[in-house]
Amino acid sequence: MTTTYVLDHPEKGRIEYRDRKRYLWMSSLFMPLFPMLGIFLYFAFDTQWALAIPLLFSYFVIPLLDYVIGADENNPPEEIVPQLEEDRYYRLLTWFTIPMHFIVLIAIAWFVGTQPLTVWSVLVLAITAGSYSGLGINTAHELGHKKPEFERLLAKIVLAVPTYGHFCIEHNRGHHKDVATPEDPASSRMGESIYKFVLREIPGAFRRGWAVEKERLARQNKSVWSVHNDILQSFAISAVLQGGLIIAFGWIMLPFLALHNFWAWFQLTSANYIEHYGLLREKEASGRYERCQPHHSWNANYIFSNLVLFHLERHSDHHANPTRRYQSLRNFDGLPQLPNGYYGMYLLAYIPWLWYRVMDRRLLELPHIQGDLSKVNIDPDQRDAIVRKYGQQQTTAVPA
Amino acid sequence: MGKYRCPGCGYTFDEEQGDSHEGYAPGTTFESLPETFTCPDCAVRYKEDFEQVDAEAAR
């Protein structure tokens, strides 16, 4: 069974589009099996080594699959997008993943709390659970951008799993406004390692989210410390969920949940790090930044990791049309492209010298930059070193 | 009382209704919104980007 979208366009004639990924999107429903897979194999083969398999899959198999399966040729015509948006099938998939995030965290916590495990196994499980909850932030990202109140509520609920209730407010109203500027704590700068970035991104995001919510509530003549605070509502669910796990499974939950939460946040940090690295919007005469353009985001048009991430990697179209649903996001030629999918790029980011080696050149070669360092968002602490390294080459270059 | 629409995502600010979630009471004029106002739904478009919706055309 296939669904073909058809439109009789007054000028362009009959436009047809069939989404070849339509049923592949159902893989989101099976994603929870991956964090659980290690536990099944542990019981089947009675070895704690099995617990590492899901992480190996995320960080080694997914980048490999992106490399092997390659780019995604699917691209819905703009005229068909309204029909795709209306198709409720796609949004139901995102809704169904919400309970999975609660189930998986509770199941892994139960396993950690009741099985005789080594410290290493607990660490691996906390990171595995954190990775899956990081995907929960990705789903909250998809839902939190949508207009229906119900989907924003689901986003608030799923953000409670990794205790990151301020994300949607901070992201929609902060990051999307300030993206690719030095003012944005969620846009990384050239020469800034991910380990430096995380210390700016996590606290900066919380402060900005809280400030935006405080301002909104002040307009309603309400205190920021009220039950109407969307951030506090999500944190209240977190308190019940994670407090309940501590009561049920004891002190081991404290380090487990701390690492789980941190790793989920760090997944978001990783995505933020690679999505806008070094890119800079120009300031207009009015003092305002130019509107976010397609060349202000890095993209990765790989089939496999995009299926895992609800098309997050088609990032330029997302910033141009933030309320657009994942199935409608499009890829365009000539956009800044990452050399692998997000999971592969995360690994690269974790090794800063290798990241700079691959990305700095790629950044400076972008058509709108062409080596002009004034068009790059540079870490102020690294500016001198970067100018020495790349600025010289430009001034000494002899025109052909 | 008029309506103003975000040309990017279609969010519409209706002066008659305001936007209670955002804390703008019914009867808030678009003019009186802060200059820093960005579209509450997409945050891509600024206040000056908003287009007045023709009451006749919207009907």
Image (cartoon, rainbow, N blue to C red):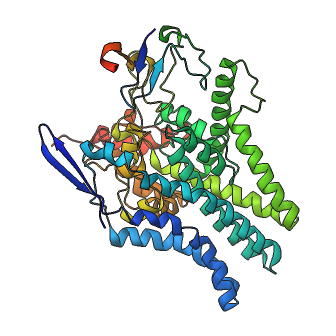
* Image quadrant in which the C terminus of chain A is located: top left
- x and y percentages locating residue A338 in the rendered image: 38, 55
- x and y percentages locating residue A61 in the rendered image: 47, 74
Vertical side of A255 occupied by A313: above or below: above
Vertical side of A42 occupied by A187: above or below: above
Residue sitting at the far front = B59
Which sits in the foreground, A386 or A80?
A80
- x and y percentages locating residue A205 in the rendered image: 62, 39
Which sits in the foreground, A384 or A284?
A284
Image point (51%, 33%), residue name: A182
Residue A237, can we see it? yes
Residue A329, can we see it? no
Q: Is residue A270 left or right of residue A315?
A: right
- x and y percentages locating residue A246 in the rendered image: 84, 61
Vertical side of A91 occupied by A106: above or below: below
Q: Is residue A176 left or right of residue A266?
A: left
Image point (55%, 33%), residue name: A174
Q: Quadrant of residue A296?
A: top left
